[in-house]
Amino acid sequence: MSQDVSEGRADALTEPTVSLPVVQHPAGPAESSIDPGPSVNQGPQHPPLRYVSARNMRIPVPVAPLSPPPGAERRNGAPRAGLGAADPAHNRAVERHWSSQRNRSAAARPFTRPRGRHAAMSRRQRWEGRYVRTLVLADLGAGIVAGAAGFGLRFGDDVTAYNRTYLWISALLPVVLLAVLAVSRAYERRYLFVGTDEYQRVIRGGGGLVAGMALVSYALELDLARSYVLAALPAAVISVLVLRFVLRKRLHWARARGEALRRVIVVGHELSVIGITHQLRRERYHGLEVVGACLPPEADGIEVDLPVYGTFDDVASAVELADADTVVVLSCPELDGAAVRRLAWRLERDEVDLVVASALVDVAGARTTIRPFDGLPMLHVEHPRLHGGSRLVKELVDRVGALLLLILFAPVLLTVALCVRLTSRGPVLFRQVRVGRDGQKFRIFKFRSMYVDAEARLAELRHLNEHDGVLFKIRDDPRVTPVGQWLRRFSLDELPQLLNVFCGQMSLVGPRPPLPTEVAAYADDVRRRLAVKPGMTGLWQVSGRSDLSWEEAVRLDLRYVENWSLSLDLVILLRTMTAVVRSSGAY
């Protein structure tokens, strides 16, 4: 899949400044005296919450201070009796943690609350529970099929005194598989729905199951047939991975239709809110639907295509008004550690999820570790794995996989070569110089999808370029042959690149292989793509291909470089099959 990416730039940030819309409280008998005032960004006052959680009823709420700090006056104007002015150097904590404003938490949320659950959270718990139960049933079915297949391949249909033990092992395999996956935390919801953590835990659990069975058979001196073990256990793990991938794709399709989404309140500055909103709307498979925003008190007035529920002090009431179940806090100086901690206390009582966006762009969680240093939590960021044993494993997987795919697709390769040869004049294979890892040049192989004079006609078509970066892409390129259009649509023109992978010049998964002229126009950050081998497929190919902007394609390639793993490669390869079938962005 080598088609380049294209999309116009968003010009939303250059539009005239307008006032921010403000969502007010619905009028009611208990709220008729509230006056929000004329300020654009002033948020609604906190009404009593209707939905509460019984689990956290005993969690204490931060209450208003009983008295002002030393030397200050009471709220009603009466001076403090018996205390003089405080020494400013005595205790700075009082000045940091005391506020002259009325504590909204104590006024809006009484300590004793009726039982119940937040409505949005209840909806989310229902569909998440159904998804986990479906996973359990799918894993159980995979274990049953793998056990039956292993027994049938090794012993056939006859049950004898010798293989009766293996029959019991096949019957216990599904239960043991579920137990191993549960111990590997493959059913925890934090690892499901999106990302590669789920698949990594399945692979680790499968490896542990193989190692555990080998250890038990050695300790108990069990004479297990190796052919049965090699057939049943890998089949179980592979079946679990495939079924989980299918279920996840079904969930992503449901999210594309507007189902199974989390309702999100975004907290941050206008530009950050606009950026994260556009990204989440484009990548709906993440399951985050932005339904509102809370902006700083001194907002600049940039148009936000969202309901604005007030300022940072109004997040809790915004959650209630928007019926949200998740709050995303973007990086901004106003929300320091103490402010985020207080917000977490407020959201905890309704079990509303709090997500803090890291300033580390596209750094996966596997590379970050929280390490305490003198009582302070420090975020340690590991370097990406660009060398070492894991890269040797990737090299081996690439070359063996390319050889197997060449053998598997040999009839397809011959058929396509014959079609190219008979339908247009010129060679079957198109050879072009591309740039690989560390700037090394190599010749890439592709089935020819254009006429032989395509390069000569490039200058006269340069003004029709639809891409916004250094690439040249147009949808209806007159240089493409009729057969080439079909080859590009289903990415069949890229199959000869398996030869490049087998020779070690490319990888099955990696960034797009660029032209030397493109590399010459790269900025310093973009050159980071050359730290790894280019791939036949990658994150940008399975995320939209030519329908993506240049900046988005670069961001996806850099994300892959920084967070490479074998499980991520497996996910991309699985997603490649669905992307080829959809053929979206291929031209």
Image: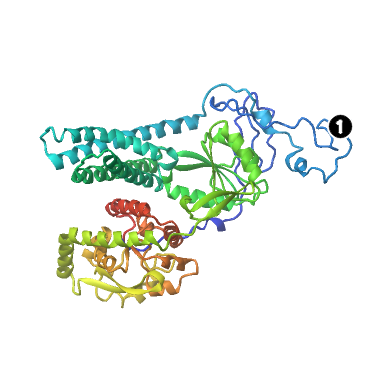
Q: Residue at x 34, y 57 (%)?
A: 585
Q: Residue at x 59, y 55 (%)?
A: 16
In the drawing, does residue 97 fall left or right of residue 581? right
Residue 515 rendering spot, x and y as whole percentages:
37, 72
Residue that badge 1 annotates: 80
Residue 573 rendering spot, x and y as whole percentages:
31, 54
Quadrant (top left/top right/bottom left/bottom right) for the N terminus: bottom left
In the drawing, does residue 281 fall left or right of residue 30? left
Q: Nearer the viewer, residue 364 or 225?
A: 225
Tag 1: residue type?
Arg
- Judging from the image, the colouring scheme is rainbow
Q: Residue furthest bottom?
A: 456
Q: Nearer the viewer, residue 436 or 305?
A: 436
Residue 41 rendering spot, x and y as whole percentages:
65, 43
Question: Can residue 485 be seen?
Answer: no
Snapshot quadrant of residue 297: top right
In the drawing, does residue 11 fall left or right of residue 160? right
Is 514 above or below relative to 258?
A: below
